[in-house]
Image (spheres, rainbow, N blue to C red):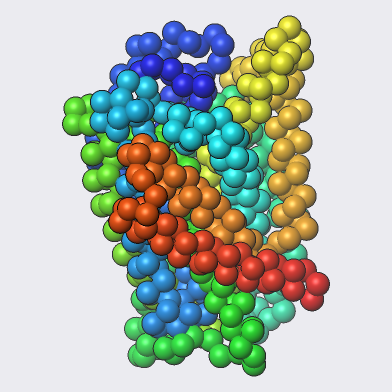
Amino acid sequence: MVEVEEQDEYSNPLLTDIPSSSSDSHHASLKRTGTVWTAIAHIITGVIGSGVLSLAWSVAQLGWIGGPLSMVVFGIITIISSNLLCDCYRYPDPEVGHIRNRSYAEAVSSYLGTKSMWVAGVFLQESYFGYGIAYTITSAISMRAILKSNCYHKEGHGAPCEYGDSLFILLFGGVQVIFSQIPNFHNMQWLSIIAAVMSFAYTFIGLGLGFANVLENGEIRGDLSGVSTSTVAEKVWLSSQAIGDIAFAFTYNVILLDIEDTLKAPPPENKTMKKASTIAILITSFFFLCCGCSGYAAFGNQAPGNMLTGFGFYEPYWLVDVANACIVLHLVGGYQIYSQPLFAVAERQIAKKHPNSRFVNNEYIIKLPLLPQFKLNLLRLCFRTAYVASTTGLALLFPYFNQVLGVLGALNFWPLAIYFPVEMYLAQNNVRAWTSTWIVLQAFRLFCLLCTILAFIGSVQGLVSNKLS
């Protein structure tokens, strides 16, 4: 559902709280104050995440030519697709349209209809759910890495310092059960700020350690073609996984329109957002190139799947510990950032079907010693706990960092970053078939689809082979 100018059916995590039936009047006085600089900050915070940690491994699989080239290509693709999506914020005209599309799903509904919105909604919710699984795995690996780092420091680098993931996955799940009771984004601004600061902290530490290792080695390691394998098929699978990991690192389209909805006008929001998106992607692409290439230069074909947990770095052990602690703190907030939209959609639908249910709608004030009072809703408690349990269970079943990132990146990249933005652009501009613009966009879409299929098959193969081995 969309509304003229001030619609309130969908959430806007970067601007305000999740609206409910009692908050319709809240948006009537909503004042948008965002600028190109605030948008750049939001985009960089959203793009730089746990995916950056796998880029050294990705470059190792593709080599000095394929690795950097793939990141440049995905950066260009992201700029093109995000610019197409920027024009979908208003409907029917991208600059003066009287309907605001405050979320990705709303934009698809406005331009392509309800059926397409439901299809996009499936990919969106799967994307949010997938981020929950990936963040649970990454957090567990980082917690384990802290223990291993301390063990190696005390016992020596050759010591058998092995720890399982299961306990840490369960621990992270338990923490998320608590944080998932935060009602909505309006109540978790402090958590988002902490998460953003932590993401920059561990990324800079990883980048610095990589460059320091290169200087210590006195050489730049690696090959033009990357890791050597015993068979061509194995090389293809590993390269495909690497492409999927890179795609995961660049994906942010699911929150683009949420960011655009924070911008003030004039100038038109789409022009401001295009400028911000282009600048931010150029910055993050440069950052990704530095992280991926410095890691590969430091470790060569032995680059670990996760720069900060694969133990290419042993010393200074305390800095490795700090970096991994920053990862865990970032992902506590990151899990919520990608889970709250899913919570909002599901709970809103349940409340619509059961408007008179006390279990669904009643809130109870709880006051515990030494803690501020908070509101407890039984539906929120049961549904969100079950959701966290499901992501935790799948993380226990498939605790494979690079392969999971590759599957998620490949699965979501083409439909959310390519297919729907292109379709909305064609519908918005009434582009006829077989015109030059139509042919260029179809070629663009086909190229991205082939890359996605290759990455998806390779990542699934890696996931299955790791599970069976």
Q: Residue furthest right?
A: 468
Q: Is residue 444 above or below residue 269?
A: below
> Considering the image in quadrants, where does the C terminus appear?
bottom right
Q: How many badges with numbers are in the image?
A: 0
In percent of width and height, residue 367 lies at: 66, 16
Residue 462, quarter of the rendered image: bottom right
Which residue corresponds to the image point at 56% horizontal and 40% vertical from the top-left?
A: 120
389 displayed left or right of 15: right
- Rendering coords of residue 46 (x, y %): 43, 47
Nearer to me, 85 or 445 = 445
Task: Tell me if residue 320 comes above or below residue 96 in the rendering.
Answer: below
Which residue does the image show at 28% across and 40% down from the upper left?
A: 273
On the picture, is 264 further left or further right than 453? left
Image point 67% across, 15% down: which residue?
Answer: 352
In the image, farthest residue toward the bottom: 230
**Residue 282 visible in the snapshot:** yes
Q: Nearer the viewer, residue 280 or 443?
A: 443
